[in-house]
Each structure stands twice: as structure tokens, then as C-alpha cells.
Image (cartoon, rainbow, N blue to C red):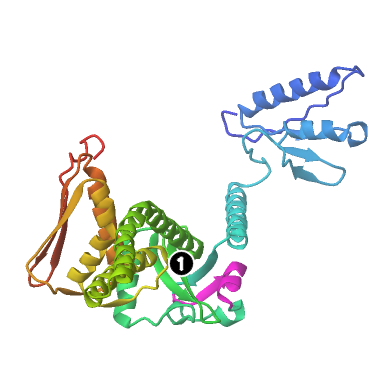
Amino acid sequence: MKQNISVRTWAHVEWPKEENISQVLMDFEENADREINKHGIISVCAYDGNSLSASMQNKIMEWHEYFMTDDALVRSYLYRGNDAIFPSLSDQDLRDKKVERQLYAKNEQLQAFMKQNLDSVMIVGQNEKVLYINHIFEETFGWSADEILGLNVYELPVATAFSKEKRDRKDQNIKESGSIYKVECTRQTKDGKSIKVLQTCFPFRDEDDQIFAWVVILRDQTERYQAQDLLLQSEKLSIAGELAAGIAHEIRNPVTAIKGFLQLLNADGKNVRTYYFVMASEIERIELILSELLILAKPQLTDYKSNNLIALIKDVITLLDAQANMNSVQIKTICTNDEIYVKCDVNQIKQICINFIKNGIEAMDSGGVLTVKVDQSTNEILLSFIDEGKGIHESIL
């Protein structure tokens, strides 16, 4: 051992036929393996296979690096100890075989990662050509591997066209990210449908730590966005439900007025025009309140147009006045101009205003004044909602 000379050991083991001998034998094998392993020596299992049960053979193979058959010496795949070096192999052979095993294992892991991944996977070479796509990519986007492989990654039909400047900037972002680069984007399917995806890129490196390829994973975000939309719609319906009681109370007032005037009309037809004007005004108010409630509850398409922000705020206050009154809150507006136009989606801005005003009302337990203030400068508009509540406790904030 001191002179680093290879040593082979051979032990011929026999045991009596006893009922508990198998456990004794296993203890012996385990102890023997542990002892000779300290010296870097290997042991070979050469028991008579015809006299052993399959379970006992497996147990024996747990404590031997190799096992011997009539015509072969084979490494035990059940061995529990450290990897041993077979003494007849040269150091270079061992290194080569170790590297070969590592490469094989990595290749197997990589193949399993590609094939079993539930996301779309693509491998891109250093020349920006697509080298591989998995079957999920084909199923998700509709193009086959024959149609995609060999194409430049920036000219794929799944991606929108890139300008050279944008491509260079994207390359720079990927390189600066170090190892993993993530971005949310939109990709196209073969049938023309757009899919929101989370795109993740990370490099393949060789033994010299040089990048030789990139892995691109495209995770379909459709279900996540659908869930978000459902959650938003649920919140809107919840708010609409909370407002319903106040709105019912608010509508009852003009309905009562209309009923009263109808009775007056029936009794006295002299002031028909005056009665008609009041009733028409009250009916318009009912229509406005109901239309605002329907807009809040009904799903709307995003529609950006130039809208008068002040008129929009007044519509929201009309909708929330009833709830404010029920909570002893007065809503006051401060603005320097009756017409301030912004390009926006009406329903989304209204939803924001409703949320802020509702929060302000709920923050004032004993009532008060909620001020909606609009400040306009050259390039921006500041919309403030100021309540007289006690504020949020510092620990909660």
C-alpha cells in the first residue's frame, strides 16, 4: 500500500446451513466491505448463483462493487459504498471512462428534461440557429420540428419581427443577466392566435465554461391571465353587490317623487309641464345610477379614448353618493377646470375612483368630508382622494 502497488483480494466464503445464516452473512459482507474500503481495495462477488435466492443476491450486491458470472465481471448497480477503481485499469482509462460516464449521464438528464418538460423548450446554437424543439413546442404553437429547425431564432414565425437595434439590445440584456434572463412577451401560433408567455433563457456551457448554446423555455401564461381576469371581475361584482343596498335606497327617492307627481297629475292637470320636467329629471337620474352600476358589473373591452376626467368623476360620485350618505360622508370636489381631457379607458379609471372613494368612506367611522381634488400642470394631472379618517396604524402600514 505504501508503494502504491495495486492489490487484488479474493475471499472464498462458505457458511453452514442455518435458518438465521443469511442475516449473519449480510453483517459479515457489510463489515468486510467497510474494512477493505478504507484501503481503497475492491471486492468481487462470486457466489454460486444457483444456490442463492434472488433477494439474497440483491443484498450481496449491495456490499460489492463488482459481481462475477461465468463469463463476465460486471459493476454492481446496487452497490452502497463509494465508487472504487478497478485495479487493472490505467489512470488515463479511468479518467476517460469517468468523463464518458459523466457525459452520458448529463446527456440522459438533458434528454429527459427536454422530453418531459411541460413547457415549450427550444435550443439555439451560437449561430442563432434553432437546434431543437420539444413536442410541447409543436403542440402549443402548431409548427413541426421540420418547419422550425435550422431557422434563425429572430426570424421564427412564432415571434414578432425584430429590428437590428432591438435584437442587439435583447442580446445585450441576455448577456448582462449572467445566467438566466426572463421576460414576459407575446408569441404567435400557426393559426394566428396570440399567446402570452414567460420566456426564460439560460446558457449551455462546455468544460471550459464557454457558452456553446442557449436554452429557451416558453411557459404559456394564458391560464394565469384568465385567472387574473376572473379575480378582477369577481372583485367588481363584489363591489357592485355592496353598492346595491345604497343604490336601491337612492332610487327609491326619485321613484317616490314620480309616484307623487303622477297622483298630482291625476288630481290637477294645470301644472302638467312642471310636473313632467321634474319626473323626467328624476327618471334620468335613475337611468344614470343604473347604467353606472351595470358598467361596473359588466365585463368591458379595453377602449382608450379622449375623455373628460371631470365628467367621469361626477358620474362616479353619482353612483357612490347613496353609500356616502348612509355613512354620514359628504363627497366634495375641487378642480380648477370643468373640462380636463385625458386619453384613458373610462371603465378602468372609474373603477380606480370607486375603489379610492369607497376606501375613504370606510376609513371614516364617524362620517366626515371626502375631498376629490384635481390638479393640472403642463404634462400631468394629479388626482387626489383625501378623507378625514384616523389613518392606517403604523404597524399595519
Secondary-structure class at tag 1: strand
**Quadrant placement of the N terminus:** top right
- The x and y percentages for residue 284 are 29, 71
Taking the image as shown, residue 7 lies to the left or right of residue 182, namely: right
Residues 91 and 116: in front is 116
- The residue carrying pointer 1 sits among few (fewer than 14), some (14 to 19) or many (20 or more) residues within 10 Å by Cα, namely some
> Residue at (53%, 77%) from the top-left corner?
189
The answer, for residue 79, to whether it is visible in the render is yes
**Quadrant placement of the C terminus:** top left
Question: Which quarter of the picture shows residue 365?
Answer: top left
- The x and y percentages for residue 17 are 92, 19
- The x and y percentages for residue 356 are 25, 54
Q: What stretch is highlighted in magenta?
A: 127-142
- The x and y percentages for residue 161 are 39, 82
> Residue at (44%, 65%) from the top-left corner?
199
Residues 139 and 204: in front is 139
Q: Is residue 131 magenta?
A: yes
Question: Which quarter of the picture shows residue 212?
Answer: bottom left
The answer, for residue 356, to whether it is visible in the render is no
Which residue is label 1 attached to? 197
Relative to 129, is 359 above or below? above
Relative to 243, is 171 above or below? below
State the residue lying farthest toward the front: 267
